[in-house]
Amino acid sequence: MKTLLKDIFSFEDRPRFERIGFLIFIIIILIFPFIVKSAYGRAVMIKFLLFALFGVGWNLIGGYGGQVDLGQGKNVGFGAYTTGLMMLWWGIPFWVTVPIGMIIAAAESFGVAYPMFRLKGHYFAIATLCVALVWKELFVFWDWTGGARGIEIPVKPHPNFYYMQFGSPIYYHYFIFFLFITQVLFMNWFRKSKLGYELQAVRDNEEVASSLGINVYRTKVISYTITGGLGAVGGSFMTSYYLYIDPDFVMPLDLSILIAMTVMVGGGGSLWGPIIGAAFLIPLDMYLGAWLGAKKRLGIDFMIYALIMMFIAAREPRGIWGIIERIRKRK
Amino acid sequence: MELTFQLIIYGILMGLVFALIALGLSLIFGVMNIVNFAHGEFLMVGMYIAYLISTFLHLDPLLSLPLAAIAGYMLGIMSYHFLIQHILRGPMVAQLFGTFGLMLFLRYLAMYIFTPDVRSIKQGLLVGKTLSFGWVNLDLSKVVSALLCMLSFGIVYWIIYRTKLGRALRATSIDAEAAQYMGIDTKKMNSLAWGIGGATVALAGSLLAHFYYITPTVGMLFTLIAFAIVALGGFGSITGAFIAGIIIGLIMVVSGHFLSELKFTFIYIVYFLVVVFRPRGFFGW
């Protein structure tokens, strides 16, 4: 028990400058709502934390596992729809729906992972894409999910901790921060766990890992299942925050890509990479998109995204964190 | 009876167009083992060229065919030189994201220039005319487009299997290193594969524009259809792409008639099942 707690909360194996950086980051997030009063700034911050949460979860399979999964959007959708539909139909409190959403997403991931991990590389990436698209089309097609119109969550008259509905964004800020930090701590434990080491060994060299007695297939399937569950948490948050969900909003292809991209830009396979990636991309998206949108310049923000993506793919596949590490090693 | 007949004919016609679309993807994959996510965006470029020729120059959209082919060729070569050859050395993740970035770039460039509005070609020699064979009425634009696609497919097939250039290309796809020792400039072959891939798919796009709506986001769908075809036919197989194209065309048209909301879902499911249970496809090696 003591070692478990130590594994979760201890960052001792990381260099000092990383620990100090993380501490400063946490302090900034904690005092942020008291410094920034503008509603837009707070919304950007919440979106940043949400995508950092998605990125940290996806990093498990995409970064530590090295498997390019382009279908995380479906898990976000499962979480969002589980929470949304259960609240709408039976009025079940938010905190009960989150684990159920996670279980559903994880079960689905387990089901498709089983045949899918017979594939590698490109074939695997396209297969994940196809699975996510099939789910999205089914959610549009079905009536009981509200179809393309989506569902609206009944608004409670008073702020409510059971349903996590509040009037002020400050509550949502600390709420998403809580979810985010839980996943960071989970990942901190995961990377030092047996499965975590096995997964990293599989990423680096499957044959060597296999010859060391690691069951490659099983490691990948379990990791993919966990990633599915982690993705659903953010989806549940989206339901309680936006109070409206439809398939184009919570499970589009663009979402899957953006999640993968935050990790890729920040640097996969490191604890901080997804956070750095989200800190870079989300404000860029929100401010640039708003600024250009006001000038009727549709699409330029995504073109800049695409250029960054191509540049990183060609020049620095390990992302921003790779650049930081390289600078540090040179000293 | 009439309906069945018509569905089958349309399925085959659509399949011939799909086969030409998938040809380039299969060729590129065969030669350098890289999947091009921007493939459908090349198609979209061809569609917009046909649209521009028809709407702004008031010429027949058929005249856009050579233009689209040249533009596609240039686009393919440029993508290879400015992006692909730099990401070939990197890990697979980087390759995926590189072509994905290219896809996003072209898509949103089109959105910037043409706005997200849905467009279609309204004037042209083939547009809106029907061809009657007794009791079966067929859309003339689909018939001619499909035949032209088949012709282009045949020409590329001839280049690959009957000319010296094609032999060099095939040698590169079988073993790039050995081909290099034999004095084949493999870099040139890679760039040629991208050129041919871009040209064929843009050509297919300018034909498809005769009877399909045009939006900046139309590409992704055709990229996935092309993936499904290439997976079914076997990655890198040209003959496979032709036959699988027709099969996918039939599946899409027939299922689209009965369950129009889910017609693409069937294609994704086919891809998934083929790749999982027979990764080599039907004609792959």
Image (cartoon, coloured by chain):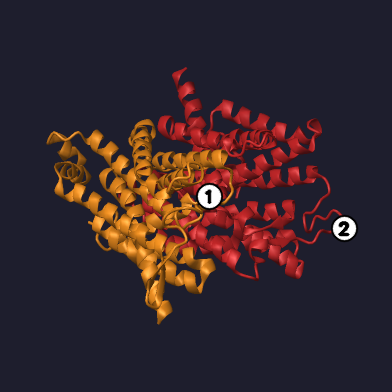
Chain colours: A red, B orange
Residue A194 position within the rendered picture, expressed as x and y whole percent measured from the top left: 46, 49
The reply to the same-chain question for discs 1 and 2 is no
What's under tag 1, amino acid-wise?
A: Thr
Question: Looking at the image, which residue is at 57% across and 27% down?
Answer: A16
For label 2, the SS is loop
Camera-side residue: B241 or B61? B61
Q: Name the residue under label 2.
A: A157
Residue A120 position within the rendered picture, expressed as x and y whole percent measured from the top left: 36, 52
What's under tag 2, amino acid-wise?
A: Pro
Q: Check the residue under mark 1 and report the chain it is in.
A: B
Camera-side residue: B175 or B91? B175
Question: Looking at the image, which residue is at 69% across and 65% down?
Answer: A85
Residue A97 position within the rendered picture, expressed as x and y whole percent measured from the top left: 69, 62
Question: Looking at the image, which residue is at 55% across and 38% down?
Answer: B113
Q: Name the residue under label 1.
A: B215
Q: Which of marks 1 and 2 is in front?
A: 1
Residue B256, visible in the rendered structure: yes
Question: Looking at the image, which residue is at 48% across and 22% down?
Answer: A327
Other-residue count near label 2 (Cα within 10 Å), few / some / many at <14 / 14–19 / ≥20? few
* Residue at the left extreme of this rendering: B182
Left or right of B248, for residue A170? right
Q: Check the residue under mark 2 and report the chain it is in.
A: A
Left or right of B267, for residue B187? left
Residue contact between numbered discs 1 and 2, judged by CB atoms under 8 Å: no
* Residue at the right extreme of this rendering: A158
Camera-side residue: A252 or A160? A252
